[in-house]
Amino acid sequence: MSTPPSSADEPISAGELSARYDKFVVDLLGGIAYGELSGFERLSSDARYSPTLNDRSVLGKMAVAEFGHYEMVCGRLLAMGMDPELAMLPFQRMVDAFHERTQPADWHESLMKAYVVDAITEDFYAAIAERLDGETRGIIAKVRTSTEQTALLEGLLKKMLDEDPRLSSRLALWGRRLVGEALTQAQRIGARHSFLVGLSPEGTQEESAAEVAAILAQLTRGHSKRMSRLGLTA
């Protein structure tokens, strides 16, 4: 792992930097693993709203991919000598709370949630990838949502909105709620765990917080662009 030059007044030892980064990676992978596992459960459950068997197969295929990602991340944690369950446990309550607060009422909201949450997750992975060591970056690349999947969801949403324009205002409001909940949850997780320190191991808490704020602003801009492509107000 390479680290940027120190900007702190007091030098930090190489051992301390390594320990901070390792803790960050374990937390990151633990959070990702539980996110993928809960995503599998969410998509499998939401598929029941599907109006057609083809639509059900779309969410089913996504659920299978999420579970594959979960197994891949757990494999990496095991290779690091970590217990995946222990790495995931700190994130269980917060992730579950997010899904409880954003339960879709029907197929339209299920599809929008899959699109919004997966896209924000994809943007987050892309934003942090450059700050990671090569091996961890490789794992992140493998769990990122495929562009084909994102395009498929976007196409289904556009078709749905074209067929029933009355859905626009409701789904725009639902999209705003989803992104607000997702970003709030990301801030809570970042503050409670080691993400703030791990993103900038040699920087101050204020510098790390500013870096996280910049990432969250980037996620918000990405969401706004996607909503515009759907013809919705972000």
Image: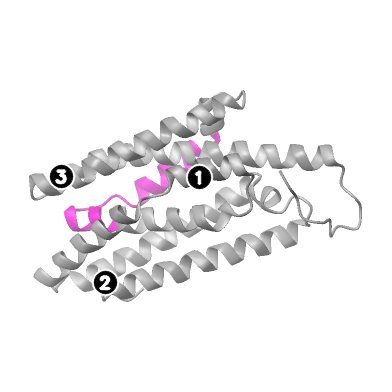
Where is residue 35? Give x, y as percent. 43, 41
Within 10 Å of disc 2 (Cα), the crowding (few <14, some 14-19, many 20+) is some
Within 10 Å of disc 1 (Cα), the crowding (few <14, some 14-19, many 20+) is many
Q: Compared with residue 2, is residue 38 higher up or lower down, i.e. above or below?
A: above
As rendered, which of 206 and 115 lies closer to the eye?
115
Specify the amino acid type for callout 1: Ile
**Viewed as shown, does residue 99 lie left or right of 54?**
right
Specify the amino acid type for callout 2: Leu
Q: Distance between the residues labelled 2 and 3?
A: 22 Å
**Viewed as shown, does residue 20 lie left or right of 182?**
right
Q: How far apart are marks 1 and 3 (CA)?
A: 27 Å
Q: Which residue is found at the position 86% from the left and 57% from the top?
A: 8
Where is residue 53? Give x, y as percent. 9, 44
Marks 2/3 in contact by CB < 8 Å: the verdict is: no
Q: Mark 3 points at which residue?
A: 56
Q: Compared with residue 170, is residue 190 higher up or lower down, i.e. above or below?
A: above
Q: Distance between the residues labelled 2 and 1?
A: 27 Å
Specify the amino acid type for callout 3: Arg
* Residue 86 in view, yes or no: no
Q: Mark 1 points at which residue?
A: 140
Marks 1/3 in contact by CB < 8 Å: the verdict is: no
How are the colours assigned in the image?
Answer: one colour
Q: Mark 2 points at which residue?
A: 230
The question of residue 99 being in magenta is answered with: yes
Identify the element where label 2 is drawn: loop
